[in-house]
Amino acid sequence: MHDTTLLELFTDDIGNAEQLLELIEHEFQALGERDLARLQAILADKQPLLAKLDEHGKVRSQLLASLQLTADNSGLRTLAARSSRGDELLACSEALSALLEQCQAGNLRNGRLIRASQTSTRSMLGILRGGDAPNLYDSRGATARIGQQRPLSQA
């Protein structure tokens, strides 16, 4: 009974993780295009998937705990050894783990792109505000600041 429930949870989560991975790829494209409206829509679509994955993970842990097994891979392997559907359970668990690792890698990649974009935007704003005066070299080769900086809007 518990193995069937776990198998259903794994199957549902594999579908959820595939959708999440697809959204992460769309998010990467939208970040590159700086399409904020599309990014907001993607975020709205990601939230329920993340909530379902979290909820199903807790249910799987509770099911394993109710069988007095650890809520990790070794507990699942113990249950699989007792179950006629053990091979299916392990295959689904591995498939879900692989998908979640891909989601994590894509999310990290998107995070790096966001940080690079923030740095670039901060730099451009500094130039526009006139706060970031470039270092120049004087006749002795030492760096010298330009005396009077004005924002680009006042130039």
Image (cartoon, rainbow, N blue to C red):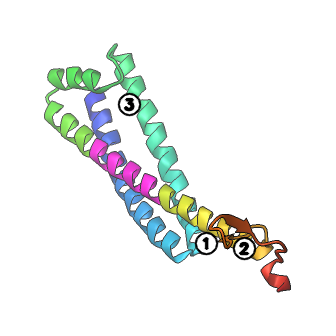
Whether tag 3 and tag 1 are in contact, CB under 8 A, the answer is no
Query: x%, y% of residue 145?
Result: 75, 67
SS label for mark 1: helix
Amino acid type of the residue tagged 1 in the rendering: Leu
Amino acid type of the residue tagged 2 in the rendering: Ile
Bounds of the magenta span? 96-110
Q: Residue at x 38, y 30 (%)?
A: 60
For marks 2 and 3, give the CA distance.
Answer: 53 Å
Q: Which residue is mark 3?
A: 60
Q: Nearer the viewer, residue 90 or 38?
A: 38
Q: Residue at x 48, y 66 (%)?
A: 27
Q: Which residue is mark 1?
A: 36
Q: Main secondary structure of the magenta part?
A: helix
In this rendering, which labeled residue sits more in front, label 3 or label 1? 1
In this rendering, which labeled residue sits more in front, label 1 or label 2? 2
For marks 3 and 1, give the CA distance.
Answer: 36 Å
Q: Quadrant of residue 119?
A: bottom right
Query: x%, y% of residue 89?
Result: 22, 35
Position of 135 with respect to 7 (left or right) is: right
Amino acid type of the residue tagged 3 in the rendering: Arg
Q: Which residue is mark 2?
A: 127
